[in-house]
Image (cartoon, rainbow, N blue to C red):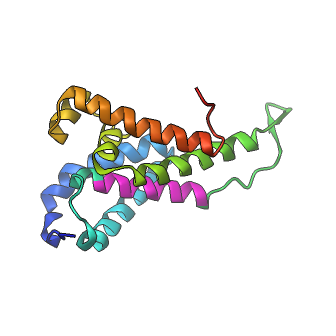
């Protein structure tokens, strides 16, 4: 495994990627302060883990995957301490605790399985489905044709879907 030098994360890199990471975190965490904290934790983890960065994906993709794991860990730590009944507008309503836990559990399955995808498939799914990068831009960043990107996305998504079906979080098509 070829390690890259620690100098790869420069002030310019942080200035470029920090708004991207913060936007990613904000979409998944409704608490602004918590989103900022998770981005800071991500930078710390990236710097500590940099000697193990093998360069199989872009630095951007690698750092976003660290943030994704930080967000999943946050959801795990914040497992609902929920009463089974909540009061809303003077009325008693049942809370879908099982549905909330299923969403968090499914997210955990996806995060774990996404990490296990082959490098190119993982990068394609991360860029297009996680980061929301346009397909033409993703193909260019990966150095593949748009058709090859489509194949990578199909394979990656199929593996993710299979993992969710195996864990009983999605219906077989």
Coordinates of residue 145 in the picture (x, y in percent): 17, 30
- Left or right of 12? Residue 17 is right
Quick one: 41 or 142, which is closer to the camera?
142
Task: Please tell me whether the stretch drawn in magenta is mainly helix, strand or loop.
Answer: helix
Query: Vertical placement of 45 versus 30: above or below?
Result: below
Q: Does the magenta stretch include residue 90?
A: no
Residue drawn at 43 percent across, 52 percent down: 35
Name the residue at 47% across, 50% down.
113
- The reply to whether the magenta stretch includes residue 69 is yes
Residue 33 visible in the picture: no
List x then y, in percent, for residue 158: 45, 36
Q: Give percent across and percent down for residue 66.
A: 37, 58
Q: Between 55 and 117, which is closer to the camera in this rendering? A: 117
Residue range corresponding to the magenta coloring: 62-76
**The N terminus lies in which quarter of the figure?**
bottom left
| Residue in the picture at 15% in, 35% down | 140
Q: In this view, does 81 lie to the left or right of 25?
A: right
Which quarter of the figure has residue 42? bottom left
Q: Can residue 173 be seen in this view?
A: yes
Give whichever of 68, 21 is nearer the camera: 68
- Residue drawn at (35%, 39%) of the image: 125
Residue 34: horizontal and vertical position, in percent? Answer: 47, 55
Q: Is the residue 140 above or below the residue 107 in the image?
A: above
Residue 145's place in the image compared with 57, above or below, is above
35 relative to 44 in the view: left or right:
right
Task: Please tell me how many numbered marks the rendered image carries.
Answer: 0
């Amino acid at each position: 495994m070829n390690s890259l030098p620690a100098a790869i994360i420069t002030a310019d890199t942080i200035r470029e990627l920090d708004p991207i990471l913060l936007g990613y975190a904000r979409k998944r965490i409704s608490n602004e302060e918590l989103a900022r904290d998770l981005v800071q934790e991500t930078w710390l983890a990236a710097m500590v883990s940099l000697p193990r960065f093998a360069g199989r994906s872009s630095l951007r993709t690698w750092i976003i995957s660290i943030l994704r794991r930080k967000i999943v860990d946050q959801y795990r730590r914040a497992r609902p301490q929920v009463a089974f009944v909540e009061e809303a507008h003077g009325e008693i309503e049942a809370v879908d605790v099982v549905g909330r836990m299923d969403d968090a559990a499914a997210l955990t399955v996806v995060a774990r399985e996404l990490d296990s995808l082959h490098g190119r498939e993982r990068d394609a799914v991360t860029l297009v489905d996680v980061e929301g990068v346009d397909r033409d831009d993703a193909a260019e960043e990966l150095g593949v044709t748009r058709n090859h990107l489509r194949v990578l996305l199909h394979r990656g998504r199929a593996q993710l879907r299979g993992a969710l079906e195996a864990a009983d979080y999605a219906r077989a098509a």
